[in-house]
Image (cartoon, helix red, strand yellow):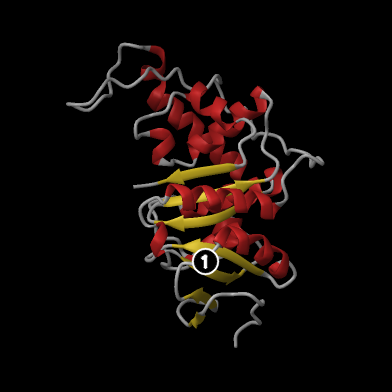
Amino acid sequence: MPFALPDGLPGGQFLSSGPVPLWSSDDFPDDVEVLWPHLLQELRGRGLVPLLCGPGSLGRPLGLDHVDAVRLEEALAADFAEYRHRRLPFWTDPTSDLTPDGTEPWPHDPGPPFDRWPGQAPRMPATAADPTPGEAASSLLAGLVDDAPFGLEDCRLVLVPARRGSDALALLGWTAEAPLPLLCALLRSWEDRFGAQAVALFGGELHVSVTRPPVEAGHVNRLALEHVLSTADNIVDDPPTPFPEYATRLAGRTSWSFWWD
């Protein structure tokens, strides 16, 4: 047995593919929102990360050195300069029409309120009112089960030997169209600053629970820009959500969702 398993798991098996051993359940776990807080507590000292993974999520593993090599502040500053150059004509001209033929006109997006990269949103301090990691993840999972998005029923519980969820994503070699080194570096930073943790990935979707989300408008705007620079299609292009609207919805939110085509 590559690693000791906690009590209370559904039936499953170890997988031998890839550079690290993985354990996967045979079926979608019953009462997953109840199971998750128990898993987080049990696995905290074992160096195991639980993830809800869809079929085909496991690809070619990404070495953690590729994530280590991302200089996040520099990368985001450069990406924002390029993004602003590309989108500024549409932000400044409400008559610009990006709407595909046969669809309703998209609302005008004035873009983020920054002329230059404002820096990353600051770390949020822990407070007594914050949900625990288990509570935040359980709430996210309960919402997913209620909504039943396409592909969720095919997910399996996977245990990954990793120090944190962002590293687990890299070691799985998640097969979505996301820029994986940048995304894993962002997730590392969000883990440290906001108590974020990757919970579910299936198809091109990634769902993240958060224990210390920002609420102040200035901080939320900077975080929303980081989300935009993740290149997620549900934020940037499908259709483009007006930046002020997206940032307002993000304030105090304890779950974040991204997807890539």
Which x, y percent locates residue 123?
Answer: 73, 39
On the question of residue 182 being in view, the answer is no
Q: Is residue 37 visible?
A: yes
Residue at the spot of label 1:
30
Residue drawn at x 39%, y 64% is 154
Relative placement, left or right, of 204 versus 118 is left
Q: What residue type is disc 1 on?
A: Asp
Secondary structure at numbered mark 1: loop
Tell me the quarter of the picture where residue 151 sits.
bottom left
The residue drawn where x is 57% and y is 54% is: 198
Looking at the image, which is closer to me, 261 or 253? 253
Where is residue 125, by image quadrant? top right
Q: Nearer the viewer, residue 35 or 39?
A: 35
Residue 43 location (% of width, % of height) = 69, 69
Q: Is residue 136 left or right of residue 79?
A: right
Q: Is residue 21 above or below residue 75?
A: below
Q: Taking 241 as reference, is 167 above or below it?
A: below
In the visual, does 53 lie left or right of 56?
right
Q: Nearer the viewer, residue 236 or 145?
A: 145
| Dot 1 crowding, Cα within 10 Å, few <14, some 14–19, many 20+ | few
Q: What residue sits 38% from the left and 29% below the top? A: 240
- In the picture, the quarter occupied by the N terminus is bottom right
Image height of 101 relative to 32, above or below: above
Single out the residue that lies furthest toward the right: 128
Of the pair 180 and 233, the residue shown nearer to us: 233
**Above-or-below relation of 220 to 152:** above
